[in-house]
Amino acid sequence: MVKLAPSILSADFSKLGEEVRDVEKAGADYIHIDVMDGHFVPNITMGPIVVGAVRPVTTLPLDVHLMVEEPDRFIESFAKAGADILSVHVEATKHLHRTIQLIKSYGVKAGVVLNPHTPVDAVKQVLQDLDLVLVMTVNPGFGGQSFIESTLPKIKELHRMKEINGFSYEIEVDGGVNDQTARQCVEAGANVLVAGSAIFDKTDRAAAIKLIRSNS
Ligand code: DX5
Ligand code: ZN
């Protein structure tokens, strides 16, 4: 069954703990945490302190999406704060293989993220080492943007390479995922859907999650 990862970027930060508990109760599988540094993306959000604050509130895996330049500098802090999955952008690190090993050295699952324009080829050499590949279906930086359909062939390609080679990475999509766009992601081969506004902008989160699931 497809996994749903609500992005707390669209949550009400004045009551973050309650928001996280609410989506856990509503049937979420992961909690997706969007970290932005104001350099790699034109926005600033949260850091290890927020990951540490969310950690005791939920038993769900914390899926931390690092939209930061030179992520190696922060991996130890996020690992110690309680991240279960740490994903770095291939465009933001010079030595991708080293970064992946660094994440794993803390016992954390390693993911790599592709911007909409970045080809699958950019991660081909490390696919065997990955626990997750995240395909951005919007340009990273903000919640509530429209899904970019031209990214779908990359999801298919990652799925095909996984099947052919027997790799074990999960395929996650992030950006503009809702009850209208979820199905094409899953049909292309994604098994984890991130959704921010499509879940947190609704008052009934259980209904929102159910709607995406039933349309995926
Ligand atoms: C965008 C973030 C996403 C964002 C998704 O840079 O990585 O996780 O929160 O938000 P929606 O689902 O509203 O597009
Ligand atoms: Zn994200």
Image: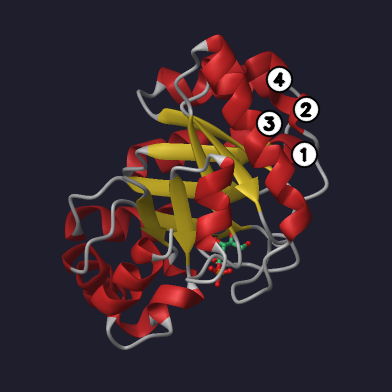
Q: Is residue 103 left or right of residue 82?
A: right
Residue 124: mark: 4
**Contact flag, marks 2 and 1 (Cβ < 8 Å):** yes
Image point (54%, 71%), residue name: 180
Distance between mark 3 and mark 1 Cα atoms: 19 Å
Residue located 20% across and 68% down the image: 21
Tags 4 and 2 touching, CB below 8 Å: yes
Q: Is residue 8 or residue 207 the one in the foreground? A: 207
Q: Is residue 44 left or right of residue 13?
A: right
Position of 50 relative to 117 (above/below) = below
Give the residue pinned by disc 1: 91
Disc 1 crowd, CA 10 A, few/some/many (<14, 14-19, 20+): some
The residue most toward the bottom is: 203
**For this view, does 105 lie left or right of residue 162?**
left
Disc 4 to disc 2, C-alpha distance = 6 Å
- Confirm if mark 2 falls within 8 A of ligand 1: no
**CA separation in Å, label 2 and label 1:** 9 Å
Check disc 2 and report the residue beneath it: 122
Name the mark nearer the viewer: 4 or 1.
Answer: 4
Which numbered marker is on residue 157? Answer: 3
**Callout 2, which amino acid?**
Ala
Quarter of the figure that contains the C terminus: bottom left
Query: Cβ–Cβ below 8 Å for labels 3 and 2?
Result: no
Which residue lies at the image location 55% right of the left edge and 21% below the top edge? Answer: 162
Q: What element does badge 3 sit on? A: helix
Residue 69 visible somewhere in the drawing: no
Place of residue 81 in the rendered image (x, y in percent of width and height, measured from the top left): 34, 45
Front position among marks 2 and 1 = 2
Q: Earlier in the sequence, mark 2 or mark 1?
A: 1
